[in-house]
Amino acid sequence: MTQQKTRALNLRIPGPTPVPPDILAAVGRPMINHRGKEFAGIVERISERLKDFFLTSQDVMVLSCSGTGGLEAAVVNTLSPGDKVLAVSIGAFGERFATIAEKYGADITMLPYEWGQPARADDVRHALKVDPQITAVLVTHNETSTGVTNALAQIAEVVREFDKLLLVDAVSSLGAIPLEMDAWGLDCVVTGSQKGWMVPPGLAFAALSERGWQAYETSKMPRFYFDLGKHRDAQAKGQTPFTPAMSIFFGLDVALERMAEEGLESIFARHKRIGALTRDGVKRLGLELLCTDERFASDTVTAVKCPEGIEVSAVRNAMEDNYNIILAGGQGKLSGKIFRIGHLGLCEEDDITQTLEALGETLAKLGFKR
Amino acid sequence: MTQQKTRALNLRIPGPTPVPPDILAAVGRPMINHRGKEFAGIVERISERLKDFFLTSQDVMVLSCSGTGGLEAAVVNTLSPGDKVLAVSIGAFGERFATIAEKYGADITMLPYEWGQPARADDVRHALKVDPQITAVLVTHNETSTGVTNALAQIAEVVREFDKLLLVDAVSSLGAIPLEMDAWGLDCVVTGSQKGWMVPPGLAFAALSERGWQAYETSKMPRFYFDLGKHRDAQAKGQTPFTPAMSIFFGLDVALERMAEEGLESIFARHKRIGALTRDGVKRLGLELLCTDERFASDTVTAVKCPEGIEVSAVRNAMEDNYNIILAGGQGKLSGKIFRIGHLGLCEEDDITQTLEALGETLAKLGFKR
């Protein structure tokens, strides 16, 4: 208990991620006119800078909502009710993406994988061959619920072969691990502020390719708040179509400056290094990763199988009570079976070694024998 | 110019409203686990306290979006495509509410008024009599674009007579001027954090009556992010269905405490006093209100006709440059014709007397002769 009081919070969930003090100070700034010059400058700077992280020449729109709202924007701006859509799902967020499209009337063909496994580009090719009426493919880049990163570049190559629309959930990947929107030919890419960006939740960022904007013109799903055309047109004037979550914009402005200073390649290298450090440490403790093929293990979140006879809640509670370290549990059918360690955004080696050390001690106390 | 540097910003737009330092400090708090006990306590406290302001025994859901997102939630959770809907509109936001319903396939009958005029309950009665197939009525309580407050209690009485669904945009009224959800029989009430609540933008609050929840069960408009049932179920467990804009929740928690201390009746009395002070001062300067019948003049925002021969932009720029006072311009067809003074949320007599004094000096310099 003394330990907890002296240790700073080590928030090791895969979002919201820790926010550095300078960004928090910006988040707590007083309000200004959201239609004035100063805020227009912020909107312009943010939307320009985000292109460097999406690696796109297209506009990146900033929506005031969570990542899920961003996924809904991807769907309703490009599809029409009745459209045949292939939903590649490797976990809870893959299912959610499919559910959103289904709720809006898309005709979904699921391509599901066992949770913990990545999607295979060949399966996507097969599915598109079997049903030429499919017009769009939904895919999760990095599945937060399982700690698996799909081979997005390869999947995109297949989707381009068939000339279908490719909508990508990059919520827990973008800004942390490599994704090249234009080079890979992705048609819609969505991410969220509380992940790699070191900013509190409240904003989603979305971009459409030229093909994506063509789909927007003919798409018939209803939309208003999430209408990306409205957002694009307002942003061109340094505005947002509706009152934005200004505090998070203030924070993002500082965060993007900080990320530009670190540099994209350094950010990727840091996540790669820390991802490997986490997985190696977990295995050294005698634990198993949910993702068995490490070529697809995520560098932003690691899902660990909870050892037989030990409760996930016991591990998480002890880690919180004794070390002030917060781990995530499992989602959906993995609830009670895994715990997850987030290592995206603001994360250094020390955060992980501290976590692994505490985890080893905790498991020993709970009676885990390797 | 010296004046601007020494004067604190006086943000007199009708939202975002100024945020007090203690609330800003909360907004800038470090991140915690959004699925942990502490955040659950905040969600529970907020959703319980909001009932006292809505004057309802129903659940109040907190959505991470702007007020417009809240209006979309009102529509998609209660209506079905093809539903006949009467849209009472007295300004830009009345039109927006109708447009949202139309985009989702409602069959809209407009009941429009000249901008600056309130709606008449008798017209609503007539419209409902003429077309018995109308199933729902949309109405703006306080029209931010014109500074007019509708006689919502009377309009609600008529809608109850005909047993139709009544959806209310209370974005710039709730928490500042009287609104009694249960007593008046309102079926959906929506408001936004950056108005009367002294909190930055980023959250909308929405509640459904029992009749509203019945409509929810049969409503066929597509929804996912704005699904109020998902929000209700998550909130019952101290959660939100999707990652919430936590910083704004932190601020709201402090704001509601502060508002509870001031007390609802005192808050209403303050807004009434300051509304009258603003209008009297504006008229004393020889200016005309857009709202000619003062029984309907808004106690949260005052729209002022810009005198002949003087540019709205000249007035606003001079007020900002010389006094650090920010006024709003006109929206839509009132652009260039009016300016607006916001006086909701954090607003005391001094803020208004300072504004009126500066406005008098500014107009004199711009050559205004009364």
Image (cartoon, coloured by chain):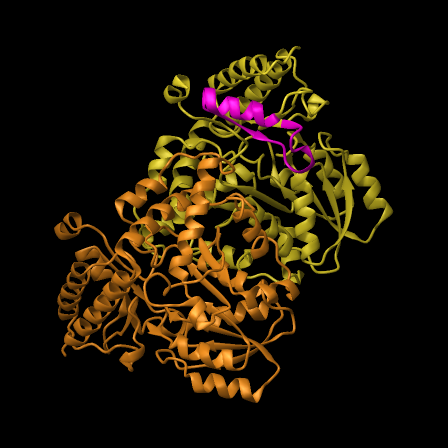
Chain colours: A yellow, B orange
Decide if residue B103 is in sight here: yes
Decide if residue A249 is in sight here: no
The residues colored magenta run A312-338
Above or below — where is B216 with respect to B292?
above
- Give percent across and percent down for residue B304: 26, 73
State the image quarter where residue B319 is shown: bottom left
Quarter in which the C terminus of chain A is drawn: top right
Q: Residue at x 42, y 40 (%)?
A: A252
Q: Residue at x 60, y 48 (%)?
A: A71
Q: Residue at x 66, y 38 (%)?
A: A332
Residue nearest the observer in this picture, A159 or B12: B12
Asked whether residue B194 is drawn in magenta, I would say no
State the image quarter where residue A340 is shown: top right
Asked whether residue A328 is drawn in magenta, I would say yes
- Asked if residue A302 lies left or right of residue A333, the reply is left
Residue nearest the observer in this picture, B17 or A361: A361
- Give percent across and percent down for residue A256: 44, 36
